[in-house]
Amino acid sequence: MRARERWGYAVWGAVALVIAIPELIAAIWEKATWPTISGTIAHLEELWPPTAVVVVAAIVVIAVQAAKASQTGGVRTVRGRGPAPAPTPPQSGRAEILYSVFAFLGVLGPAVVALVLSGDTSRHTKWILGCVIYGSIGVVCIGFPSAIAYWGGKDVPFPGFFETLADLEHRWHWAAVAILAGLVVLLIHLALYPWPDVPHHNPTPTSP
């Protein structure tokens, strides 16, 4: 396994863990002071219905890019595809440590500030925390590493998210199918929240 591929699994695996921890806590622990990602998005859709269109469009774009990456190997050139330049090995772990601290403070800091400013008694505190926590994760843990992986070129030791998906698909063929299936389920869940936890009509011979 190439060092660049290992870096991809490490970086994006860590990002998945950062997303999963608050999500699982909110889903399992009833006394959590923040909602799940789907709950936060559903609340935003109530405030502004076009949010659902934006979310669905974003998931479709991610699914298309993931499918393209699995077909092309996820590497890019000036026009977006082809052999990527070989990364320059980092001289020390200082940058990784600094980024870890930055990511930790970038997610925790805004959440603490939002909690203090909004107050525990506010009925909006839960939703404010959800927007701040997941928004910070999106910017700090997804947007920032994606940007430096794309524009950093050979100076960055880890690949972008879609290149990592392509590497995973090459090692485990069903990974692409599982990821695309998960994105479709997520799309339906967010667009028709709280699907599949919705009442169903069970017809009987005497039903109208």
Image (cartoon, rainbow, N blue to C red):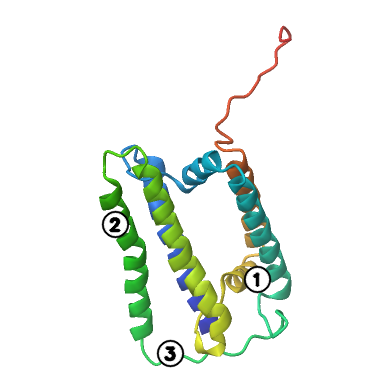
Q: Which label is found at residue 113? A: 2
Asked if disc 1 and disc 3 are in contact, CB closer than 8 Å, the reply is: no
- Comes first in the chain, label 3 or label 2: 3
User: Which quadrant of the figure has residue 64?
Assistant: bottom right
**Percent from the top left, x then y, of residue 5?**
54, 78
Nearer to us: label 3 or label 2: 2
Left or right: 97 as drawn, with respect to 68? left
Q: Residues within 10 Å of mark 2 (few under 14, many from 20)?
A: few
Q: Is residue 161 above or below residue 4?
A: above
**Could you tell whether 201 is left or right of 114 in the image?**
right
- Amino acid carrying mark 2 in the image: Val
Q: Is residue 101 above or below residue 82?
A: above
Q: Quadrant of residue 1?
A: bottom right
* Crowding near the residue tagged with mark 1, few <14, some 14–19, many ≥20 C-alpha atoms within 10 Å: some
Left or right of 57? Residue 24 is left
- Determine the CA span between mark 2 and mark 1: 43 Å
Name the residue tied to disc 3.
Answer: 90
The residue pinned by badge 1 equals 170
**What label sits on residue 74 in the rendered view?**
none
Q: Name which of mark 2 and mark 1 comes first in the sequence.
A: 2
SS class of the residue under badge 2?
Answer: helix
Mark sitting earlier along the chain (1/3): 3
Q: Nearer the viewer, residue 136 or 141?
A: 136
